[in-house]
Image (cartoon, grey):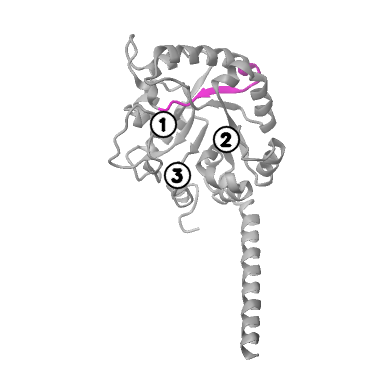
């Protein structure tokens, strides 16, 4: 009988503790929706939702709670809504005070269903549409580049009428040589009449080019930037692929992130998105934000 009473007491204590933990978590989530942003430039910092792809696949609300708790209010993502309708996804963005300013697209949508992109961008209030990849046989060729340039110039011209800016995100495979000198990416930048670019600091460096030198060479080409640092000692190539854990905390790798941010602000980069592809994202992003001066390391 005494044992039964002890078991009952233990069960009640555990229930109270569990209830308290749930309430604390709920309170923390509510507080995160109102998290202050301390850095004056912070509204122009955001995160690429791909960074939290695993959590988003299981619980979109939890992922958004983390992002808002980190003091961020701007995201890049889509068209993936992780199992939710666009309406429900947008409602959660609004609930957590998050603004999706750049939505993903691809060459197929640009060429065959531009209306869908315009509708999606307008629904979210996104002023940027981003192409992240050009399907190609290896190596990336002048024919691949020419096809993409033609599609993006035409789509970009039409998107401008909707006040949407089209950008292309290189992955380093574009650094093959071009007959006229320089790389295929140089050729794409020179041929971009109606679209711009999103610099991914990791992939530019990984492809064998100094991102600082590229930003100086083409100061008006890059409207968005992915902030991503590369583990010291890693040697890149032109494959456009890499071990996810070669993505490290900003300021701890081999890429001059602070200098790129400073120069990007001067050249007209409008949004800087952290993209952390590692499986340590929950630990790394807060440290990266501290490095950028957005969060208090002692908070």
Name which of mark 3 and mark 1 comes first in the sequence.
1
Q: Nearer the viewer, residue 194 or 184?
A: 184
Q: Evaluate if marks 2 and 1 touch, with contact meaning CB atoms under 8 Å apart.
A: no
In the image: residue 178, left or right of residue 162: left
Q: Evaluate if marks 3 and 1 touch, with contact meaning CB atoms under 8 Å apart.
A: no
* Mark 2 and mark 1: Cα distance apart in space: 25 Å
Residue at screen point 56% across, 45% down: 72
- Screen quadrant of the N terminus: bottom right
In the image: residue 237, left or right of residue 97: left
Name which of mark 3 and mark 2 comes first in the sequence.
2
Residue at screen point 35% across, 21% down: 175
- Look at discs 2 and 1 and give the one toward the viewer: 2
Circle 3 SS class: helix
Residue under numbered circle 2: 77
Q: In which quarter of the view is residue 216 placed?
A: top left
Residue under numbered circle 3: 292
Q: Residue 126 appears at what percent x and percent y?
A: 63, 30
For residue 48, say whether it is visible.
Answer: no
Q: In which quarter of the view is residue 44 placed?
A: top right
Q: Residue 246 appears at what percent x and percent y?
A: 36, 41
Task: Count up the numbered dots.
Answer: 3
Q: Tell me which segment is drawn in magenta.
A: 159-171
For residue 249, say whether it is visible.
Answer: yes
Indicate whether 176 appears above or below 171: above
Circle 2 SS class: strand
> On residue 263, which mark appears?
1
Name which of mark 2 and mark 1 comes first in the sequence.
2
- Look at discs 3 and 2 and give the one toward the viewer: 2
Q: Residues within 10 Å of mark 2 (few under 14, many from 20)?
A: many
Q: Residue 58 appears at what percent x and percent y?
A: 59, 48
Q: Nearer the viewer, residue 2 or 285?
A: 2
Residue at screen point 69% across, 36% down: 86
């Amino acid at each position: 009988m005494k044992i039964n009473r002890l078991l009952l007491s233990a069960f009640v204590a555990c229930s109270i503790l569990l209830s308290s933990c749930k309430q604390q978590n709920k309170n923390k989530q509510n507080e995160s929706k109102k998290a202050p942003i301390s850095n004056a430039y912070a509204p122009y910092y955001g995160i690429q939702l791909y960074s939290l792809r695993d959590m988003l696949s299981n619980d979109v609300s939890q992922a958004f709670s983390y992002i808002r708790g980190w003091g961020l209010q701007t995201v890049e993502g889509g068209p993936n809504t992780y199992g939710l309708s666009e309406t429900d996804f947008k409602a959660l963005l609004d609930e957590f005070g998050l603004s999706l300013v750049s939505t993903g697209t691809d060459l197929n949508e640009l060429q065959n269903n531009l209306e869908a992109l315009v509708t999606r961008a307008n629904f979210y209030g996104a002023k940027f549409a981003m192409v992240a990849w050009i399907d190609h046989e290896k190596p990336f060729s002048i024919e691949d580049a020419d096809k993409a340039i033609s599609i993006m110039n035409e789509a970009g011209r039409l998107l401008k009428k909707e006040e949407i800016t089209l950008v292309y995100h290189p992955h380093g495979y574009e650094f093959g040589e071009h007959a006229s000198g320089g790389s295929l990416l140089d050729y794409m930048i020179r041929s971009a009449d109606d679209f711009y670019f999103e610099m991914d600091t990791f992939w530019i460096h990984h492809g064998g080019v100094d991102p600082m030198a590229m930003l100086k060479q083409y100061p008006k080409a890059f409207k968005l930037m992915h902030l991503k640092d590369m583990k010291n000692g890693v040697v890149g190539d032109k494959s456009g692929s890499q071990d996810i854990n070669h993505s490290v905390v900003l300021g701890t790798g081999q890429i001059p992130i602070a200098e790129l941010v400073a120069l990007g602000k001067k050249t007209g980069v409008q949004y800087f998105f952290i993209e952390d592809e590692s499986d340590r994202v929950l630990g790394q992003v807060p440290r990266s934000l501290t490095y950028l001066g957005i969060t208090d390391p002692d908070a």
